[in-house]
Amino acid sequence: MITNVSFWSESLAFPLVSTLTLVPLTAMFAVLFSRSFRLAIGFGFAGTLLNVALSFYLLSVFDPEKAGTQLAEQERFFDYTYYSVGVDGLNILFIPLTAILALLVLVYKITTQRTLDWQFIACLLGYEAILIGAFSALNVMQFWFWTLLELAPVILLTVHGGTGHKKRWVITRLVQYWGWGLLMTLAGFLLLGFGLMDSGHALSFDWMTLKQNKTLLKNETLIFILLFCGFAIRMPLFPFHGWLPILAQQSSVASVTIFLVGLKLGVYATARFILPVVTEAAEQWAGFVVTLGLISIFYGALLALMQINIRRLLAFSVISHVGMLVIGIFCFNEHGLNGGVFLSLAWGLASAGMLFSIGLVYERTHTAFTPRLGGLFDTNISVALLFFIGALSTMVMPGTPGFDAAHLLIEGTIEEYGWVVAIAILVGNVLAAAFLLLAFQQIFMAPPKRAVQPHGTDHYAVRMEPVIAVTICSLLIGTGFNTAPWLNYIERDPTGMSAYYHKPGEKHPKDMQTKPVDGGPSKDSQHD
C-alpha cells in the first residue's frame, strides 16, 4: 500500500495546521498577560473566530479525492524527536468541530454570565489548542503529550466553573482514571517505538513509520491491551466509564460541552494508532471488544432511563453511543470505519446542542432534575427546539447527519458480524430514542410538578440564545440533508487498515513485507 504525503509548502504560503494550534494558544497567553475581563473577551472572540475561519479554509484546501496525508509538517529535533502534523480523512472534520464548539461555548458563557472571567476564557482557549494539536499529531509521543496537557484545563474548568459541591472528589476520581489511562498509553507507545529497535530499525515514534514496519513489532498483544484500555478510559467504554457521570453532574455545561470533543479522542486514537499498527492483535481481540461494546450500549441506555438528573442522563447516553462507535470501528471494513467516524462527529455536535439547551434551562430554573421541570416549551421555544433536534440527531433519524452514518455502520456490522449484532445495535438505538424523548417530554411538554421561579433577566442575555440554537440546528439539518460532501472527506480509508486486514484465503500481511522501511516521510518521497 502506498501512502501519499503532501507537505504544506506545495500548496500554501504558511503552515496551516500548526497555525490552527498556535492561534488559540497565542490568544490564551494574551489573556493571561492582560488579566483584564474586557480584553479577555476581545482576545477570546478574536482567537475562536479566527480559528473557525481557518478551519473552513482548511476544508477548502483539503482535497477529498486525494488519499493520504495532506498539508503535512515535519521538523526533527535532536536525534529521535519529530514534530509531525497533518490532516487526512480521519481527522479533517474533527478540527472544524472543535473550533465551532469553542466559539459557541464562549457565546454561551457570555449569554449566561456565570463565572465568566479572564481565567475561564484562558482555559477555554488552551483547551481548544490542545484538542487541535492532539487531532493533528502524527507522532505517537506528540499525541500523548497533548493528552497529558488536556488534564490541566479539564481540572481548572471543573474547579472554576463547576456547579456541584464535590469538586475535589470529582477531580480525584478523574485523575485516578485518566492517570492510569495515560500510563497505559505511554507504556504502549514506548513498546511500539522500542519494539522497532529490537528488530534492527532505528527508534521512531512516527505514526507512518510504525505503520509501515508493523510486521517487525513484537509483543503486539500486550501493546494492543495497553493502548485499548488506555483509550477505552477516554471514550469512555464500559467498564472504564466511572468518571464521566460524576464529572457531567458536577461540572459546568460549558466545560462538558467542549469536553465532548475531547471524548472523541479515544475513538479517534483507536482508529489512528491501534488498528493500522497492531492489526493482527486487534483482529484476535475483536470479539472481546465487540462484547464490551454491546454491554456498553445496553448498560448506558438502561442507566440513562433510570436517571432523574438530565446531565447524568446525557453522560450515560454517551457511554451507550460509544459502544456503537467501537463496534463500527472494529468491523475492519471501510463501511464500519467511515460510519463510526462520521457518527462520532454527528453525535458530538448533537450532544453539544442538548447540553447547551439543558444549560440554558438550568440558568432559568437552577435545577437539572427532571421531576422539578416541565411546561417550558411555550416560554422557551428556541431552547426546546435545540434539545429536540439534538435528540433526533442522536437517535439517527432521517434528515440528520447520523442517519447515513448509522446506515454505513450497520452495513459494516452485518458484513463482519452478521445480523444479530446489527439488530442489537438497532435495539440500543431504540432505547436511546426512549430515554431522550422521555426527557424532552418531562422537561418541556409535561406540566411542572412544582412551581419554578425563572431566573432573572438581568443576569440572562436572552438575545444570544438564537445564535447558539440557529448555529447548531443549521449545522445538523444542513449536513443531515446533504451528507455526501462530508462523507466524501472520510471515505478514503485513511488508516489504511483494510490493506492489512487478513481474510481467509488471502496472503498474510507478514508474508508481504520482511524488510524494514526507513523513518518518516520526507519532502522528496512517498512511503509505503
Image (cartoon, rainbow, N blue to C red):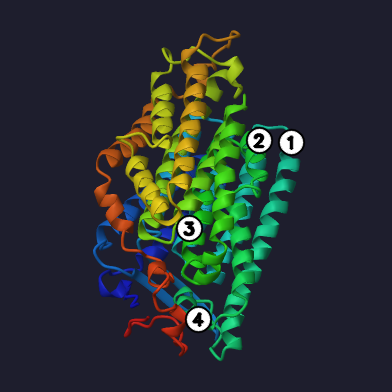
Q: Which quarter of the figure has residue 255?
A: top right
Which residue is depicted at the point 53% across and 16% down? 456
Nearer to us of marks 4 and 2 is 4
Residue 506 shows up from this direction: yes
* Residue type beneath disc 2: Gln
Mark 4–mark 2 distance (CA, rounded to whole Å): 46 Å
Task: Mark 2: give few (<14), some (14-19) or many (20+) Cα within 10 Å.
Answer: many
Task: Name the amino acid, label 3.
Answer: Phe
Q: Amino acid at mark 4?
A: Thr
Secondary structure of residue under mark 3: loop
Question: Do the numbered discs 2 and 1 sit on residues whose CB atoms are within 8 Å?
Answer: yes
What residue would you read off at disc 1?
Answer: 166
- List the residue tagged with mark 2: 250
Give the vertical position of 231 relative to 276 (above or below): above
Of mark 3 and mark 1, the one earlier in the sequence is 1
Residue 248 in the image: state x and y as whole percent: 61, 37
> Within 10 Å of the Cα at label 3, are there few (<14), some (14-19), or many (20+) other Cα atoms?
many
Q: CA distance from mark 3 to mark 2?
A: 33 Å
Position of the C terminus by quadrant: bottom left
Three-letter amino acid code at the position of disc 1: Lys
Tags 1 and 4 touching, CB below 8 Å = no
| Residue depicted at 44% across the width and 48% down the height | 344
Of marks 1 and 4, the one in the foreground: 4
Figure check: 415 above or below 160: below
**To which residue does mark 4 refer?**
215
Label 2, label 1: how far apart the Cα atoms are: 7 Å
Under tag 2, what secondary structure?
helix
Name which of mark 4 and mark 2 comes first in the sequence. 4
Q: Which residue is mark 3?
A: 330
Q: 412 or 64: nearer the eye? A: 412
Graded by Cα atoms within 10 Å as few (under 14), some (14 to 19) or many (20 or more), the crowding at tag 4 reads many
